[in-house]
Image: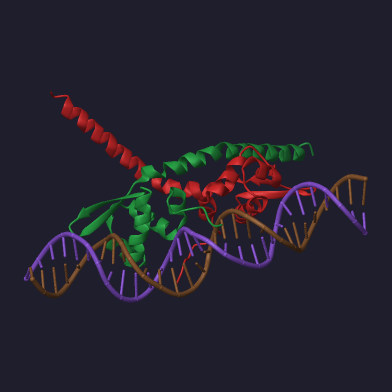
Chain colours: A red, B green, C purple, D brown
Amino acid sequence: MARSSTTSDVFNAVAEAHRREILDTLIAGEKAVGTIVGDLSMSQPQVSKHLRVLSEVGLVSCRAEGRRRLYRLEPVRLQPFHEWLAKYEQAWNERLDRMGDYLKDLQQEGEPQ
Amino acid sequence: MARSSTTSDVFNAVAEAHRREILDTLIAGEKAVGTIVGDLSMSQPQVSKHLRVLSEVGLVSCRAEGRRRLYRLEPVRLQPFHEWLAKYEQAWNERLDRMGDYLKDLQQEGEPQ
DNA sequence: TTGACATATACCGATATTGGAATATATTGA
DNA sequence: TCAATATATTCCAATATCGGTATATGTCAA
């Protein structure tokens, strides 16, 4: 059989470097598609397609203004990442503690000299 | 032409749900491949292949013990995520502030009544 | 209504990725 | 040395994904 993953979750949406660039440029604030196309160097369809993916997972929202579409970051949707990372904080800290102990040991081995 | 992204960065490595499961199960501590295969329900080659990807981006490290390979989480390698998320913290907080102001406004509109 | 502008969509070819099955490569113990 | 165990690797088919080109859709202005 074949693959299982889809673009339809936040982790996949963010896995694409170009999509991360788009998110990055939106930190500055709401932008029209054309502005994004200008800021990054990507083709218009390319940007539109990536925006669609980002939009589907809720990472950006869209508002029409005349014939332009203004896209905006929805940082709240980054919560899954925060939650996911939080699970690893503990493991992380434990490793750092062990590292600290190790360094301390090294130091103590050196001192008696 | 074609695609540009590869599995060779942390974001892509983590984009796969199965790989996240593997990472999750390693929070408990070092585990042999067979143990992982047993804990999650994945085939042995499947696990080995995912471990390879995770290993290539440094999210796990490996240690041989007899004929078994013990894999261990390397939470330090999640730093790129932390850094990436940090950039959005500000936007996040601003949104929350605006939300707060909005709620305050709503409240004030109600009060005079 | 027509034409220009802004964006979205459809279609396509190239390529990446996944999982399965089979097999290769250790390593241990008899 | 040989069989058993543990893991990695190879080969394969199915399919997802990306970017490009062309085109559709929608909106404004004259």
What is the total number of numbered labels drawn onto the structure image? 0
Return the residue nearer the eye: A57 or C10.
C10
Return the residue nearer the eye: D27 or B39.
D27
- Dividing the picture into quarters, in which one does residue B106 lie? top right
Q: Quick check: A3 above or below A51? A: below
Q: Residue at x 72, y 37 (%)?
A: B105
The quadrant the C terminus of chain B occupies is top right
Q: Residue at x 38, y 44 (%)?
A: B77
User: Relative to residue C19, is residue A81 drawn left or right?
Assistant: right
Task: Indicate the position of residue D11 as horizontal and vertical percent values.
Answer: 36, 70
Task: Indicate the position of residue A78 as horizontal and vertical percent values.
Answer: 54, 47
Task: Indicate the position of residue A39 as horizontal and vertical percent values.
Answer: 64, 40
- Dividing the picture into quarters, in which one does residue A104 lie? top left
Q: Quick check: B5 above or below A28? A: below
User: Relative to residue A53, is residue C23 drawn left or right?
Assistant: left
Q: Quick check: A101 above or below A44? A: above
Q: Residue at x 42, y 41 (%)?
A: B79
Task: Indicate the position of residue A47 as horizontal and vertical percent values.
Answer: 64, 50
